[in-house]
Image (spheres, grey):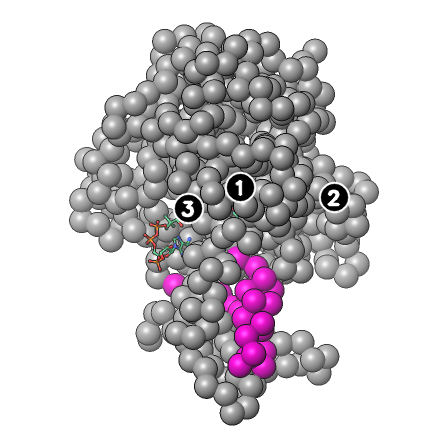
Amino acid sequence: MNHNLFDTFAERMRARGEADFITTREGRSYSYTQALEMSARLAGALIGLGVTPGDRVAVQVDKSPEAILLYLACLRMGGVYLPLNTGYTATEVRYFLEDAEPALFVCRPENLEDAQETAQLAGCPRVTTLGTNSDGELMDLARSATSWDSIESRDADDLAAILYTSGTTGRSKGAMLTHRNLGSNAEALTTTWRFTESDRLIHALPIFHTHGLFVACNVVLMAGASMLFLPRFDIDIIIDELPRGTTMMAVPTFYTRLLQDERLTPELTTNMRLFTSGSAPLTAETHQAFEQRTGHAILERYGMTETNMNTSNPYEGERIAGTVGMPLPGVEVRIVERETRETLPQGEIGILEVRGPNVFIGYWGMPDKTREELLEDGFFITGDLAMIDEKGYIHIVGRDKDLVISGGYNVYPKEIEQVIDEMEEVAESAVIGVTHPDFGEGVTAVVVAQPETQINETKVLEFLTDRLARYKQPKRVVFVDSLPRNTMGKVQKNQLRERFQNLYTPA
Ligand code: MLC
Ligand code: AMP
């Protein structure tokens, strides 16, 4: 039996025939038949470029229907899809290329020259381009390529994708996801959220992360539904499109922005059957305000790059604000005490661990790191602090890991601190997340200057410009005389968070 996830998708795609799979605002579209055909052509092009089964294909391109067809082509011919945040700088990309050793790097047409240089420095043998308007070298190659109509045979445990996630040590780790991981999760979500062929998903998330790529696109493919592909979250366009959608997947910032708009009314959302939220905590206030304004109770779920989705509020039944619901079918969750690793009784707060077919098989090239986080009994230590209430609903109450989540993007303080500390005027720094009205948490740098040096906020931000992706750059830099430390010498970030708690939300 072929466990290639594309084999499952292809069956649905053939059955859906001329039905719309993906459309854009500009009226470009692919029916399921067309998507099948183009994925075969793109697979032919990838093979022509020297990609063989098991090879990584690194992709840093703007969102477009063709980018999803490239993902499908890669699955189809047994490649390992490796999407990269479009905001990453050349320095950041070089690390990923060196670490994952892809056979091919697909970049934006306008970035070709820089990408070639980066690829050469990283030892990546081939670079090609993909634009947003069915353009770029890869599309030219696909149009003239011999269609590769078969589907490479894969085991359930073969790699389908590698997604990089930053680490608390400051070094990004490639989470290895298998065909089983992606397939089992897509099935669980499609059933739990009642996705059908009649659904039309409004897709405004980026497609280089688990949320916009796997949760959204795999579920649509599994159900044979259709989706409207928007390049980004633009409030006017979302408001215009809501009456023609049936569902939207979002990070909390989408909902806080929608709530600020008077055009959000019950009438606007009457055709919608499901709004989901995840990637960051949705506050109970936002959940309640959205229900009051529209009559829709947002369905919050909880997941991670390493695990895909773990828990979800029920489709039927009570969706409780401030909770992430119950484990998805096939997923086991336990709450343990950090030191003893003993499972805690219901109601107590501890570290959430998860096991199931959704959980990744390890970090690329990092066996030690894998052993630290993926235990022998199959449970993965998420680093999230959680509690299970008397009704069985899980509450994420905090994080045991030093991590900031800004507008749904993870930012690891260590990575930012290391770059700031490179400045000769800086003695030391601590990066924290501070409550932010738009992004949930705002990345904030607290800096101690070297004695008798001239340094200010602008200087620090300028230094970071080409070194870090925009979303990782602090929204504010503040200066202190010294960092608060405990007796072990560890920086007391709690004290800093408290001191600067009103930086973005003046009391
Ligand atoms: C953009 N900026 C951000 C930012 N997004 N800064 C911090 N955090 C963010 N998330 C920067 C821009 O570069 C710009 O900088 C300024 O902030 C304002 O930009 P904007 O125009 O307001 O931003 P916008 O393009 O509207 O993007 C905001 C957003 C977007 C929230 C819509 O970030 C987004 O789509 N987030 C989704 C992230 C996501 O998909 N996460 C899933 C991870 S998977 P300047 O200075 O140039 O103006 C995962 C697992 C799971 O976590 O469970 O799902
Ligand atoms: P990532 O590594 O980008 O996949 O981010 C995963 C992290 O996002 C998790 O470990 C959580 O800390 C956080 N997260 C995802 N969904 C939720 C949610 N619904 N509520 C709170 N935190 C969440």
Whether label 3 touches label 2, CB < 8 Å = no
Which of 382/459 is in front? Answer: 459
The answer to whether any part of residue 396 appears in the image is no
Q: Earlier in the sequence, mark 3 or mark 2?
A: 3
Give the Cα distance between marks 3 and 2: 31 Å
Percent x, y for residue 386?
Answer: 60, 54
Asked where in the image residue 62 lies, by quadrant, the reply is: top left
Query: Which quadrant of the figure contains the N terminus?
Result: top right
Q: Earlier in the sequence, mark 1 or mark 2?
A: 1
Q: Amino acid at mark 2?
A: Gly
Which of 71/99 is in front? Answer: 99
Whether label 1 touches label 2, CB < 8 Å = no
Give the Cα distance between marks 3 and 1: 34 Å
Q: Is residue 333 above or below residue 356?
A: below
Element at label 2: loop
Asked where in the image residue 242 lies, by quadrant, the reply is: top left
Q: Residue at x 54, y 45 (%)?
A: 117
Q: Is residue 25 above or below residue 435?
A: above
Asked where in the image residue 198 lies, by quadrant, the reply is: top left
The boundaries of the magenta stretch are 411-436
Q: Is residue 442 magenta?
A: no
Q: Can you identify the residue that label 2 sits on?
A: 365
Q: Would the CB of label 3 be found within 8 Å of ligand 1?
A: yes
Q: Can you identify the residue that label 1 sits on?
A: 116
Q: Amino acid at mark 3?
A: Val
Q: Residue at x 34, y 47 (%)?
A: 254
Furthest residue to the bottom?
452
Q: Can you identify the residue that label 3 sits on?
A: 251
Whether label 3 touches label 1, CB < 8 Å = no
Q: Residue at x 58, y 19 (%)?
A: 48
Q: Earlier in the sequence, mark 3 or mark 1?
A: 1
Element at label 1: helix
